[in-house]
Amino acid sequence: MSLQRAPAEPAADGRLLTLPGGRDGIKVRMFDSKAEAGAWLAADIASTLSQAIEARGKALWLGCGGTTPRPVYERLAGADVEWPLTALAQVDERFVPVDDARSNTLMMREALEPILDGEDGPGMALYSLIEDITDQDKCAALAEKTLLELGGGKAPVFDFALMGMGPDAHYASIFPGHPVNAFVYDTRALVLPVAPAEDGSEPVLPRITLTVPAILNSQRIVFLIFGEAKLDMLKSHGTVTDPFISPIGAFLARCTAPVEFVWAA
Ligand code: 6PG
């Protein structure tokens, strides 16, 4: 199937490409630069959160870690949203102290600092998955308890989920070949500990991850991916539904929420 890219004229909302896979195709919104992609996505998140506040007086969303989303978080720090009425939870986290350079919590706190709840005044609440760094199972259990509290005693509904994807088709802390793929899609748990891969491949660090049912409890899911390698992986593995081979393909095949990718080279 030739993948026809849309005409090359610049478009404020990017150029739409639909790849085979998912429940009705994989929608990719392509931008000419990372800056344009990040600006569009930050505006989209801000608008979604403001609409949620308008509708029910508050907003709860999910943000991923890694290196890609930081500029989006930094742009959001300048957006006009009633931040004290919003809360941000994490898609997944490395099981390291929150002051460790590898911590997603550290990155998110630094990037979102101007709008976070703190000594300088009310702002967005950031819920780190690392509530205990002494024991991974206890940490996951505490994080699950927090999510249930956020959901009023049940799985919380996220107004928006900002996700990332690796060039190996992993997302969250769900990596190809990892045993977690045997149960992370159909579990009642909201949060799980993920052990490092035994062969030294990723995940090298122990992780804490939301489960697929927890992530799918989102009104809208957007994956932010940059570079040809990730786009090529989506083209080659978007239709592969074996989670041990293609976690992203398995996720998209099961994704009942509106989902799309935002991409730039
Ligand atoms: C993490 C992330 C992970 C990330 C992808 C993409 O903790 O690393 O949650 O799932 O989204 O690995 O990472 P990059 O944005 O660094 O490419």
Image (cartoon, rainbow, N blue to C red):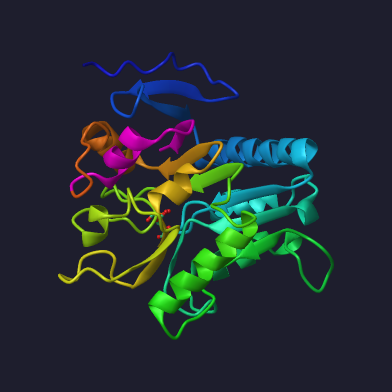
Residue 237, percent across and down? 23, 37
Q: Quarter of the image for the C terminus: give it.
A: top left
Residue 42, percent across and down? 63, 42
Tell me, yes or no, whether the highlighted magenta stretch contains residue 246: yes
Give the residue furthest to the front. 153
Residue 188, percent across and down? 40, 54
Residue 144 seen in this snapshot = yes
Residue 46, percent across and down? 69, 41
Residue 164 seen in this snapshot = no
Please determine whether, in this image, residue 126 is positioned above or below residue 48.
below
Name the foreground residue: 116 vs 6: 116
Q: Quarter of the image for the N terminus: give it.
A: top left
Name the foreground residue: 233 vs 122: 122
Q: Which residues are magenta?
A: 245-265
Q: Residue at 46% of width from left, 75% of height from top?
A: 139
Q: Residue at 58% of width from left, 45% of height from top?
A: 157
Give the residue furthest to the left. 199
Q: Residue at 74% of width from left, 50% of height from top?
A: 78
Please determine whether, in this image, residue 228 is positioned above or below residue 155.
above
Tell me, yes or no, whether the highlighted magenta stretch contains residue 92: no
Give the residue furthest to the bottom. 134
Please determine whether, in this image, residue 26 is positioned above or below residue 94.
above
Find residue 191 and report its image quarter. Answer: bottom left
Name the foreground residue: 96 vs 23: 23
Ligand 1 is located in which of the four quadrants? bottom left
